[in-house]
Amino acid sequence: MSDERLTNAGFRGKGLGLRERREPFAPGESPKCECGVFGVYAPGQEVARIAYFGLFQLQHRGQESAGIAVADGERVQVHRDMGLISQVFDEERIASMHGHIAIGHTRYSTSGSSKLCNAQPILGRCSEGEIAMGHNGNLVNAIGLRRVLEQQGMEFSTTVDSEVIVKLLAALSDLPLANALPQLMQRLEGAYSIVACTPQKLIGFRDPHGVRPLCIGRLNNRGWVLASETCALPVVGAHYVREVEPGEIVIFDETGIREIKTGANSRQAMCVFEFIYLARPDSHLMGKSVYTVRRRMGNLLAQEYPAKADLVIGVPDSGIPAAIGYAEASRIPYGEGLIRNRYIHRTFIQPDQRMREMGVRMKFTPLPETLRGKRIVVVEDSIVRGTTTRNLIHVLREAGAREIHMRVSSPPYMWPCFYGIDTPDRDKLIASRLTVDEICEYIGADTLGYLSLDNVFKAVGISRKHFCAACFDGKYPIKIPKDMKLTKLALEEANEG
Ligand code: AMP
């Protein structure tokens, strides 16, 4: 593990111009999202360990790099590296990080390539001295903002949009933090759920549309926690208080909690794909259990697209709750037909060519005993490129499945995300090129049915007007600049061009 310790002096990053050209996805791999953020304020306690356990619960939101910043009242110390939380931090490292305030971040690259200088938290300066920041989301105006800051003489050490936020805040250093943050937010366009810490404060803020989640928890009646998802709260002994509202800033310090509301005129546009795939099923979003919503999606899918079959299976893990729901409503028995190897992730050793050809087999093993001779309903949460699903169906047929009825608990995924999910170009999204019948043929299923968007919202149980569903309907709630490139390397390319 490389050891990169950041100090007030700045990053040992590689700077701009160094372009690491990397295919966003390995062949057959699906697009990756997102990031997980966590924060804790607990006077009198050593909190690096709490941040570690909190981040552990958010590992599903990012597996490329991880980092924790701790503040002890006087200074902020950051450690971050490539890899999983358990690879980046060991007992010795955690024990060496002292302080009662901490933030943490797990990353999948959605802006900037996957390399150490782009790992978070990012350290900067504000009116209160050092500030460390962790960001989940994607700005749509990062390139323009960065150009202006560079013209003002600011130097950048990373190629991520998050550093633009840190530098913009530095440019507002003559204002008290509570005044600087609303001004900062006025200049940012896009999705951001952010945790930050100064030597004495824990801060959280969320874009006025509330695209990505962020919640507040109470720790032992003496401290506070911020987390991307509620599933991170119980493990650290915190209980759920509420979500950070869209456009809200919360600041925790020795005087208590300060809440500042901004963006009153913006419409809420929470990402509906969080309910479908991104969030963990044991989380609650907008007061709803993600597990229950997914199960209900399965119920509605069975009504919308029934099938004559002997067995319902889910594609582990994200397809399972909807598969259980499908079985429940269709009265077709539910069973396990696929075993997933859970230890394959981004930092997994590169497979050699022979293994790569085996593709999906490395991740999923079929159970012929369950499948042989049967008509199977296979429930999946989404089809993005179609490659994994096609391979999976091939594997199921080889294992003896007689018929395969593919059911997807979301609508056809047709439009790229600009707000924090690393989706491929539009022409790689299978549903933007092919009709449902053509997709069915391509993946090799006997029949294919997608849940309608109306039923997605029926399952969620909250009005559609509070959501962003642009990946399904192409209606983007935050204006996308005409020249915005759909690539996480946009800042790298802009600086080269
Ligand atoms: P494919 O057939 O190649 O489109 O892959 C479909 C699989 O990708 C499904 O199992 C989805 O759960 C999964 N998936 C959907 N969105 C994402 C994402 N943002 N990151 C990783 N996997 C995803």
Image (spheres, helix red, strand yellow):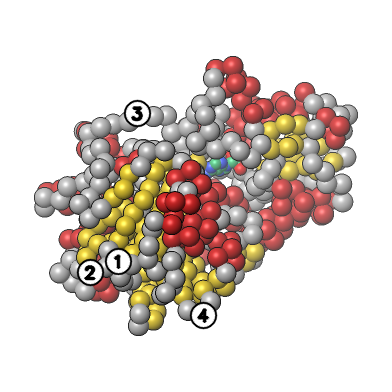
As helix, strand or loop, the secondary structure at mark 1 comes to loop
Which image quadrant: the N terminus?
Answer: top left
Contact (Cβ within 8 Å) of mark 1 with mark 3: no
Q: Residues within 10 Å of mark 3 (few under 14, many from 20)?
A: few
| For residue 293, side relative to residue 60 (left or right) | right
Q: Earlier in the sequence, mark 2 or mark 4?
A: 2
The residue carrying pointer 1 sits among few (fewer than 14), some (14 to 19) or many (20 or more) residues within 10 Å by Cα, namely many
Quarter-of-image position of residue 257: bottom left
Instruction: Give how far apart the Cα atoms at labels 4 and 3 are.
Output: 48 Å
- Image location (x, y in percent) of residue 394: 71, 25
The amino acid type found where label 4 is placed reads Asn
Judge by depth and name the residue closer to the eye, 87 or 29. Answer: 87
For numbered disc 2, what is the local secondary structure? loop
**Where does label 1 land, which residue?**
198
Q: Between residues 73 and 121, which one lies in front from this camera angle?
A: 73
What's the residue at 55%, 49% (across, down)? 60
Mark found first going from the N terminus, 3 or 2:
3
Residue 6 in percent (x, y) is at 28, 50
Q: Quadrant of residue 95?
A: bottom left
Q: Is residue 139 left or right of residue 435?
A: left
> As displayed, is residue 98 above or below residue 345?
below
Disc sitting over residue 21 in the figure:
3
Please, is residue 117 above or below residue 192 in the view? above
Alpha carbon distance from label 2 to label 4: 26 Å
- Ligand 1 is within 8 Å of the C-beta of the residue at disc 1: no
Alpha carbon distance from label 4 to label 1: 22 Å
Q: Secondary structure at mark 4?
A: loop
